[in-house]
Image (cartoon, helix red, strand yellow):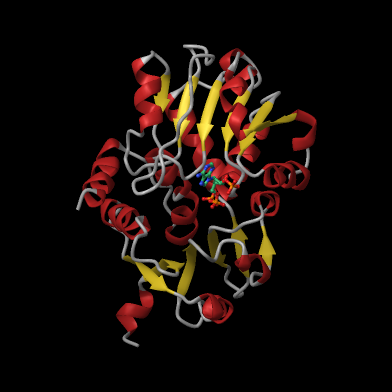
């Protein structure tokens, strides 16, 4: 390996497949914006090769990686330390190689969700609209991150709505403290969950390009509630369109994606990057290609 290449600060994203990942675009944007001699690559890693690929990071002079589908859960078994968020959410999306070669796994989705929400709507912890119930649609990995974030913000009631009730029950039992503040609603009763809510978050794949639409009657949702869809293809989902038309404040999914990338960049490249409208435009342009 050439010395120049070795000196570059290196990071990347491991997934299978990985070509869909937007992470190289946004990290490369920040590297260039902050004049950092660094490299961020998409690294295709088959699930059978994940352990070895993580072990090899230090030898290959990598500062760390992001993890995407299908590695987020399995990586829990292949790192040396796990941060509190990763433990509570049950998944890792960021790995940092410490000086000694120790691999530290963390989950930045909860931070990304809340930092983005904070950017667009004022959050008064435990009071105001945030003092009202929050409705979370879905019970997958993204829902876990959103629930952890909401708990940490002092939300007093989370209404969890999922097609598969067992999965919602599992989520509530596995995240410490969730059972005390949660109610589960059947998917067919999703509209009933909306009354008096201050926040509605869609974490399901419904409404995403190529997936089924998300059908939900918003009549019961207060007009001053915020509606957040973590889907970002399309940027304005049908849910957000309907919510905006009736006067609700809406938050799209791109901001969460951008904010969750910040802690990794800070650890690998030593600069705390900012999410700007220019970055949004760069990522949006790549989505429309
Ligand atoms: P992620 O880890 O990104 O959250 P996931 O674990 O695949 O992805 O979760 C997808 C979510 O979308 C789940 O809550 C799923 O509901 P089930 O737990 O019942 O599978 C939800 N979802 C997907 N297709 C759905 C559909 N047709 N109707 C209702 N919910 C659906």
> Whole-percent x and y of residue 55?
57, 79
Nearest the camera: 8 or 119? 119
Q: Residue at x 58, y 28 (%)?
A: 190
- Residue 100 occupies quadrant: bottom right
Quadrant of the drawing holding the N terminus: bottom left
- Residue 120 occupies quadrant: top left
Q: How many marks?
A: 0
28 displayed left or right of 135:
left
Nearest the camera: 255 or 199? 199
In the rendered image of this protein, does residue 83 appear above or below residue 229?
Answer: below
> Whole-percent x and y of residue 15?
45, 67
Nearest the camera: 87 or 137? 137
209 displayed left or right of 112:
left
> Whole-percent x and y of residue 173?
78, 44
> Whole-percent x and y of residue 84?
69, 51
Residue extending furthest toward the front: 188
In the rendered image of this protein, does residue 71 appear above or below residue 250?
Answer: below
Q: Residue at x 61, y 67 (%)?
A: 75
In the rendered image of this protein, does residue 169 appear above or below residue 182?
Answer: below
């Amino acid at each position: 390996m050439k010395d120049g290449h070795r000196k570059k600060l290196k990071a990347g994203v491991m997934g299978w497949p990985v070509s869909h990942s937007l992470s190289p675009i946004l990290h490369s944007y920040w590297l260039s914006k902050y004049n950092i001699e660094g490299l961020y690559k998409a690294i295709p890693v088959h699930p059978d090769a994940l352990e070895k690929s993580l072990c090899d990071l230090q030898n290959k002079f990598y500062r760390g990686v992001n993890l995407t589908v299908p590695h987020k859960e399995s990586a829990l078994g292949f790192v040396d330390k796990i941060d509190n968020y990763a433990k509570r959410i049950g998944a890792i999306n960021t790995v940092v190689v410490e000086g000694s070669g120790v691999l530290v796994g963390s989950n930045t989705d909860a931070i990304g969700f809340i930092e983005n929400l904070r950017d667009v709507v004022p959050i008064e912890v435990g009071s105001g609209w945030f003092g009202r119930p929050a409705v979370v649609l879905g019970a997958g990995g993204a829902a876990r991150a959103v629930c952890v974030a909401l708990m940490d913000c002092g939300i007093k009631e989370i209404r969890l709505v999922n097609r598969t009730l067992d999965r919602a029950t599992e989520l509530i039992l596995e995240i410490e403290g969730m059972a005390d503040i949660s109610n589960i609603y059947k998917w067919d009763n999703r509209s009933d969950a909306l009354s008096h809510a201050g926040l509605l978050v869609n974490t399901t794949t419904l409404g995403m390009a190529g997936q089924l639409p998300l059908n939900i009657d918003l009549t019961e949702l207060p007009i001053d509630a915020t509606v957040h869809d973590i889907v970002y293809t399309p940027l304005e989902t049908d849910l957000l369109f309907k919510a905006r038309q009736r006067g609700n404040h809406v938050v799209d999914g791109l901001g969460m994606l951008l904010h969750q990338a910040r802690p990794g960049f800070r650890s690998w490249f030593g600069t705390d990057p900012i999410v700007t409208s220019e970055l949004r435009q760069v990522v949006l342009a790549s989505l429309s290609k």
